[in-house]
Image: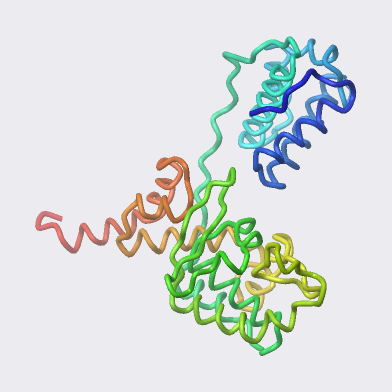
Amino acid sequence: MAPEGPVEGARTALTRFDDYLLAAGRSPHTRAAYRSDLRRFLQWAGLPGEPQAADLAVIDRPLVRAYLCHLAESRVARRSTARGLAALRSFLRFARAQGATLTRLDGVRGPRPERVLPRALRRAEARAVVTVLRGKDPRALRDRAILEMLYGSGLRVGELAALDVDDLMPDARIVRVRGKGGRPRVVPVGDHCLAALRVYLQRGRPRLLRVGTACADGPQPLFLNRWGGRLSARAVRTMVGRAARIAGLPAHLSPHGLRHSFATHLLDSGADLRSVQEMLGHRRLSTTQLYTHLTLGHVRQAYARAHPRA
């Protein structure tokens, strides 16, 4: 629910909208992307960077359609254009809830996003990257546990960075995850991941923890940086790229690449789509179905082996 009250001058437009997104549980990445998209639109439309309600009144369907044409002519990716339109819709909806009289964007359609099939690692490649880091120093123990969890549980990088110690339940072999929009779910944790986590918690995390960095009554981050604070998603991305280089894989491998591999290898081994959807935290089954396109080779081989008329 949007905050109550009328639109309030220059601060209302973007700052209060960002406050609303924060209260709604949107991720820092989404909030940053929406801010960037909205500033791009406002600049193109000749509006102030922090517009007032009267400024927003000029935004109508023809203006937005012209902006979409401008993005298409500028060869902006269709996925980015669709996100920009979503940001604008959400922003105007928020402003209307604050009392502004604005045109609805009903009937304005963005481009269909291109279907981008993720590149999944081969099983041997995935095994190589999650086992490549050696050493007994605290950060090496932490990084091995992170790699095992990214591939073994399929977490988004932001979900992993947000984990607290209490979210891990080793006896039940699960981890509690706060997904997009703050939606909770539980995800299984495999043997290799549990083993790496136990070593990190016993020998790595206590040495990374610094006095005064954690509140006794507050959240205790699971993965710590060198200063004893919560490890950032950016640091995790950098570490995954470094592990990929050491393993002889493309350096652009990302945590999301390990998540793709997690889902693809599950489906290759016969896991049902609904279970994979639940583990990935997808709201729509159609999102998970993207991975079925990656496993057609496996399906064809199974058909050739099993069907009498193949």
Q: Which of the 4 image quadrants contains residue 96?
A: top right
266 and 208: which is toward the camera: 208
Give the image's coloring scheme: rainbow
Q: What percent of the width, then of the height, locates residue 115?
A: 51, 41
Question: Which residue is at a point 42% across and 52% down the rendered structure image?
Answer: 278
Vertical arrangement, residue 198 with respect to residue 160, above or below:
below
Vertical arrangement, residue 24 with respect to residue 13, above or below:
below
Q: Which of the 4 image quadrants contains residue 5?
A: top right
200 and 43: which is toward the camera: 200
Question: Which residue is at a point 75% across and 42% down the rendered structure image?
Answer: 32
Left or right of residue 5, residue 126 in this image: left
Question: Which residue is at a point 40% across and 64% down the rendered structure image?
Answer: 265
Q: What percent of the width, then of the height, locates residue 54?
A: 85, 12
Q: Which of the 4 image quadrants contains residue 48?
A: top right
Considering the image in quadrants, where does the N terminus appear? top right
> Given the current orientation, which residue lies at the most extreme front position?
217
Q: What percent of the width, then of the height, locates residue 107?
A: 57, 14
Left or right of residue 289, residue 58 in this image: right
Q: How many numbered tags mark residues here?
A: 0
